[in-house]
Amino acid sequence: LIQLHVKGATGALIALAELGTWENQPVDQTIYHKNLKPVVYVFAECAGRPPAECIVDVQADQVFEPIQPSAGATSTPRPVHSRTYFTNGSGLAWSVPKGIDVIFSGEGEWKITLDVFRDLGLAFAAAMLMIYVILVAQTGSFALPIVVMMAIPLTVIGVMPGFWLLNAINGSVVGSYADPVYFTATAMIGMIALAGIVTRDSIILVDFIELAIRHGRPLFDAILESRVVRLRPILLTAGAALLSSLPITLDPIFSGLGWSLIFGLIASTAFTLFVIPVSYWLLKAGKEHAT
């Protein structure tokens, strides 16, 4: 720094060494506290792997007993590509002295992630409860709404494998690191929205079956006709929702929402045409046999 020059009042260059002297002075570090206890925050950026996977990986290597150095111990970590949620950890154990706690969900993005998914999970449960109450009020039955709502868990069959298949086929790379599409909070919002969409498809089938039975059609014939007659409305409803979700997949933040809707609609529409009629048959046929 003493060799740097700056302009003076007259415009001439003056060396910083002529303006004063330079001394090294110790500076007190900031001491952070949380809940009246001293705390140190450790930050890191993840590249090529989701934060949840990295945290699980680090936690797998933590031991709660002092590590004794041993001769001939290896210091080569296990390759990253061989680690999964079921076989995680680098193989290099680590620990902290007694009296020091390591909390991964105390602050930062990971805590926000846990809180968001917790709240969305509660919202999903509340949405399903409200749908069930409305269906009970409309049908006057406690069992029939369960048959109608069986289409909701079918979306999970499409969403979770769908994200894996998307990244396996169309995985992108940024700066030599993988850049997958994660199942984020927006994708969870898409699953909540799917609850209402796929329930509507089930209602279309069940309503036709109930109407056909009132007109004197046998139960088995009414179920078969419902799949044929209501196939087009179900496909049109699912297709319209699917096509409207495609532009959302181009957004870097809300792409998870779009892909969640697309994968969930494909799976639920395909399975609804089989699961709902069979479930209705088991429910009504059992009652007819009992009577």
Image: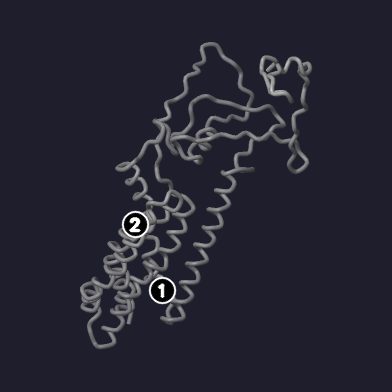
Asked which secondary structure carries label 2, the reply is helix
Q: Position of residue 104 (x, y in %)?
A: 60, 39
The extreme front residue here reads 10
**What is the crowding at mark 2: few (fewer than 14 residues within 10 Å), some, or many (at least 20)?**
some
The quarter of the picture where the C terminus appears is: bottom left
Residue 270 lies in quadrant: bottom left
Measuring 71% from the left and 18% from the top, which residue is drawn there? 14
In the displayed structure, 212 sits above or below 274; it is: below
Measuring 43% from the left and 64% from the top, which residue is drawn there? 193
Q: Where is residue 27 in the image (x, y as percent from the top left)?
A: 77, 25
Of mark 1 and mark 2, the one earlier in the sequence is 1
Closer to the camera: disc 1 or disc 2? 2
The quarter of the picture where the N terminus appears is: top right
Left or right: 47 with respect to 118? left
Left or right: 130 with respect to 251? right
In the displayed structure, 178 sits above or below 235; it is: above
Measuring 55% from the left and 53% from the top, which residue is drawn there? 116
**What is the crowding at mark 1: few (fewer than 14 residues within 10 Å), some, or many (at least 20)?**
many
Observer-nearest of 281 and 136? 136
In the displayed structure, 270 sits above or below 58; it is: below
The extreme top residue here reads 71
**Kind of residue at disc 1:** Pro
Q: Tell whether label 2 touches label 1 (CB within 8 Å).
A: no
Asked which secondary structure carries label 1, the reply is helix
Label 1, label 2: how many angstroms apart (C-alpha)? 31 Å
Observer-nearest of 170 and 66? 170
Left or right: 189 with respect to 30? left
Say the numbered circle drawn on residue 145.
1
**Kind of residue at disc 2:** Leu
Say the numbered circle drawn on residue 246.
2
Q: Position of residue 147 (x, y in %)?
A: 37, 70
